[in-house]
Image: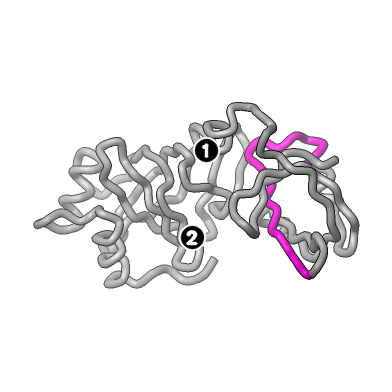
Amino acid sequence: MNKFIRTAALAASLCTLGACQSAGGLGEILGSVLGGTGGGAQQVSGSVSTLDTRNQQIGIRQSNGQTLAVNYDANTKVVYQSRVYAVSNLDQGDQVVARITTTQNNTYYTDSITVTQSVTTTTSNGTVENQQLLNGTVYSIDRTNGTFVVDIGSGTRITVSMPYGARSTDVQTFNNLRNGQNVRFYGVYLNTSRVELRQFY
């Protein structure tokens, strides 16, 4: 996670994400989206439409179709089923409730995001058709963000992320992982290079 996006770039991103109105400033958008005015913290609910870890910004799409661009930092926590995760564990489509404040630069910031429903739960419906048995050699481990990189052969490496509400046995296995170790696990591909763990084999 890197520096905050600058105010000018944020304003452009808000327009790109569809959070700008034809007239009016950020204060008016905040009032229309969150309901009410004032500098205190307010809550906004919706689904994650974008996650920009480079600029530390999340796009939250409201039920009315409007998208709000919100900044976060290393202090922002994500809570799911009473467990705390890094923001990087969020996926597009996750249903969330975020606590929002307005900064001195008239941008939005969240220090707390609660996941009310994970997109993987919504899309998989408990089925195993998309799960694959994978194996390879652990290349690197990021315990802070709950991910590890596995070399599955022929120079192909995938990033494996721990799921929300992972089983205690899988959490223990993850905590005991070492570079160079061979691992086998069931996972679901999120894209060509990222897999979400279902369980260690």
The residue positioned 74% from the left and 57% from the top of the image is 148
Q: Nearer the viewer, residue 142 or 156?
A: 156
Q: Say which element carries label 2.
A: loop
> Which quadrant does the C terminus fall into?
top right
Most distant residue in the top direction: 126
Query: For residue 124, which quarter of the picture?
Result: top right
Query: For residue 132, which quarter of the picture?
Result: top right
Please determine whether, in this image, residue 169 is positioned above or below residue 149: above
Camera-nearest label, 1 or 2 = 1
Q: Are marks 1 and 2 in contact (CB under 8 Å)?
A: no
Q: Which residue is mark 2?
A: 73
Measure how far apart labels 1 and 2 are at the Cα level.
23 Å
Rendering coords of residue 104 (x, y %): 28, 63
Q: State left or right for residue 69 relative to residue 26.
A: right
Rendering coords of residue 157 (x, y %): 74, 64
Mark carried by residue 119: 1
Rendering coords of residue 179 (x, y %): 86, 63
Please determine whether, in this image, residue 124 is positioned above or below residue 133: above
The residue positioned 27% from the left and 42% from the top of the image is 65
Residue range (magenta): 155-170
- Binning the other alpha carbons within 10 Å of mark 2 as few (below 14), some (14 to 19) or many (20 upward) gives some
Rendering coords of residue 2 (x, y %): 51, 70
Coloured how? one colour
Q: Is residue 164 magenta?
A: yes
- Closer to the chain start, of discs 1 and 2, is 2
The residue positioned 9% from the left and 57% from the top of the image is 23
Q: State left or right for residue 59 relative to residue 105.
A: right
Amino acid type at mark 1: Val
